[in-house]
Amino acid sequence: MHVRATVAAIRTTRTGHTFISLERPGPNCPIEVAVRPELLPNLTRYLQLQPSKLTGRVVLVQGYVQATAKDSTAQIWLDRAPALSVAPL
């Protein structure tokens, strides 16, 4: 699946996972991108910016959408850095 959406918020957990909320922040977020800690350096190099700078930008994401629990936000877990890119301004 390919998703094109605006980044609403970004959060990092204590375990180092980064979650990029698309369209709306918080519990009303329809879908988020999940980045494992070991992939974050590659993603930062690929994007040439920190994920925290993505808020308000339109991104293109490629991957499988999954839900982790009942009534949870759908997630796309990145498996490689090029699966997320920033749309041209």
Image (cartoon, grey):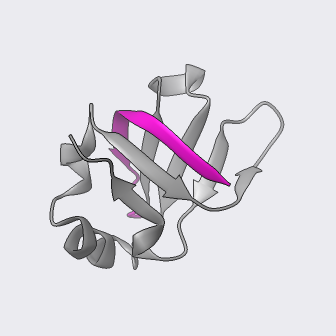
In the image, residue 78 lies at what x, y percent? 53, 66
Q: Is 3 in the magenta?
A: yes
- Foreground: 88 or 65? 88
- Please count the marks in the image: 0
In the image, residue 37 lies at what x, y percent? 40, 71
- Tell me: residue 76, above or below residue 9: below
- Tell me: residue 50, above or below residue 59: below
Please, what is the dominant secondary structure of the magenta stretch?
A: strand
In the image, residue 8 lies at what x, y percent? 37, 29
Report the side of 73 relative to 83 (left or right): right
From this viewpoint, which residue is outermost toward the front?
Answer: 88
Which quadrant: the C terminus? top left
Residue drawn at 63 percent across, 62 percent down: 63
Q: Quadrant of residue 74?
A: top right
Report the side of 41 relative to 62 (left or right): left
Q: Is 79 in the magenta?
A: no
Taking the image as drawn, is residue 66 in sight?
yes
Residue drawn at 70 percent across, 60 percent down: 64
Q: Quadrant of residue 31?
A: top right
- Foreground: 3 or 16? 3
From this viewpoint, which residue is outermost toward the right?
Answer: 70
Residue drawn at 62 percent across, 29 percent down: 30
Magenta residues? 1-16
Residue drawn at 47 percent across, 27 percent down: 23
Taking the image as drawn, is residue 36 in sight?
no
Report the side of 33 relative to 2 (left or right): left
- Tell me: residue 61, above or below residue 45: above
In the image, residue 1 lies at what x, y percent? 68, 55
